[in-house]
Amino acid sequence: MRAVGRFSWWVVLALVAMMPAGALAAQDSTLIIGTTDKVTQLEPANSYDFWTWHVLEQTTGTLVTPEPGTARLVPSLAERWQISSDAKVYTFYLRRGVTFTDGTPFNAQAMKWSLERALKLDGPEGAVGLIKGIDKIEAVDEYTLRITLKQSDATFLARLADPIAPVMAFSPKSMPADKMVNGQYAGTGPYKLVRYDPDQRVVLEAYDKYWGPKPKTQRVIEVFYSDASALRAALESGQIDVGFRTFNPEDIASLEKDGRFAVIKGKGSLSVRYIVFNVTQKPFDNPALRRALALAIDRERIVSDVFGGLNAPLYSMVPPGMWSHIEAYPKRDVEGARKALAALGYSQSKPLTITLWYTPSHYGTTEGDVAAVVKDSLEETGLVKVDVQALEWGTYVTRMSEGALGMFFLGWYPDFLDPDNFLAPWLTEAPGSLGTHLDRATSEADRAYYREFVRLLTAAKHVSDQDIRERFYVQAQQKLAESAILIPLWQNSIQHLAIAQRNVEGIVLDPSMNFRTWLMYKK
């Protein structure tokens, strides 16, 4: 009978896959979500993208989690924890009675195995680097886990929260310890993965022994669409119940006026967009020149003309909504920019000639429009000529890391909820791969900035007192505005927005960007 039951279930899944999405939407036990995102590899040690981590997050858990609606870390698989005064030893007291979806008990040994597996495999496309500061993991007893770091790190608790895949819990019986997989795993719920068709759909089924509040919907189907236009069409035709990441700005405005749909906007999006300068490439090795360009850029016009006011101008890399945020960069001052450029020897007859790079599809369809506004606002000084060039994402990333791009757009959503993650990646941790190349600075001014960022950000990680840490991050933001190695442009709220049929409830969009499907249901 068990074999027959298993066969029947897969027959049902096959029928589900062939049924029109609109027919599925009519079943209250099923919720259909559409997105233009994609899943790369459902392997915690070798994935580093939003929707892959989203799927893993629906199907397993972490020691701590952002509280829904806030950025505050609260207990999850750990009921409580202790952190040593030097922020080097973290002890977790684990929740009892939790099981993986294959029936295996969750305990300290299983959590130890999961973390050590990720560290050992360390996939080239993954984010295991976020936890490489771990020196030792100990299962003190069945429900006590102790993690000792190589050096003090007050950001470490935030690094253990979802949706970071390498810190998620997986059953040791469900996947090999020495080989990477794709969708072969058992987590701690609230859903289990029952079907994954690459580039088409993911099917999740509620886990009936989940330790927490039961999911509001029995089955969730997530469908992948080619672009924003197809996503909108699916919503309007009733093929999907919810659309999330990413609609075109004009579609959002239009659908918001359409009474058939609910537009849910998150507050305090932590997604940011910005310009990067490669400080090893002339003329961008001059902080005074970078500051002049930063003064000239019209953030307000980008937000109004390109995004219809849906995004917000940004004046620090640490965005509003994250503790320690200050308005570090000055507001636009064309005359000030003009005077600064003139002092550097540029004139109408001898203008500064630069190239601005962007990638045309990775961030949606609006990048060319943003580039046009930035070009116009810089050229308004009368002393700058901008050549705009585009590269597809793969080539873009390669040339950025090689140091071939001097001034270019990038986007960021934090790996973990701490101000450090809005500063350190470009300034001290990965300046090469993220394009600033500050660790190889050619000017003495930039070498001095690098030393100062190392000092400030290291000091901030070595104390656990948030008030003390905040002072260091405020200084780092001020120093970044002075150096203008990055130019924050806008807080990216468009990706922090869902559009749903009117009968869908329970959509919570919080600063962590965790899209919690288990809270959603149809009334």
Image (spheres, rainbow, N blue to C red):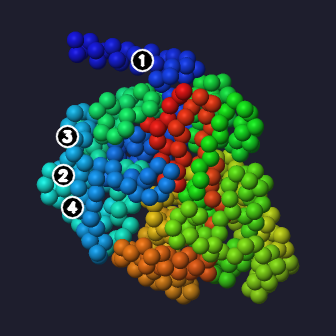
Q: Which quarter of the rendering shows the N terminus? A: top left
Q: Identify the amino acid type marked 2.
A: Tyr
Q: Position of residue 291 (x, y in %)?
A: 68, 78
Left or right: residue 412 versus residue 337 is left
Secondary structure found at label 1: helix
The residue carrying pointer 4 sits among few (fewer than 14), some (14 to 19) or many (20 or more) residues within 10 Å by Cα, namely many
Q: Position of residue 495 (x, y in %)?
A: 60, 48
Q: CA distance from mark 3 to mark 1?
A: 31 Å
Q: Toward the viewer: 209 or 351?
A: 209
Quickly name the residue at label 1. 14
Which tag is nearer the camera, tag 1 or tag 4? 4
Q: CA distance from mark 4 to mark 3?
A: 19 Å
Regarding residue 116, the answer to whether it shows in the image is: no
Q: Identify the amino acid type marked 3.
A: Pro
Q: Position of residue 481 (x, y in %)?
A: 61, 77
Identify whether 327 is placed above or below 107.
below
The tag on residue 146 is 4
* 1 and 2 marks in contact (CB < 8 Å): no
The tag on residue 105 is 3
Q: CA distance from mark 3 to mark 2?
A: 11 Å
Q: Residue at x 61, y 69 (%)?
A: 316
> Could you tell which of marks 3 and 2 lies nearer the N-terminus?
3
Secondary structure found at label 4: strand
The residue carrying pointer 3 sits among few (fewer than 14), some (14 to 19) or many (20 or more) residues within 10 Å by Cα, namely some
Left or right: residue 99 versus residue 207 is left
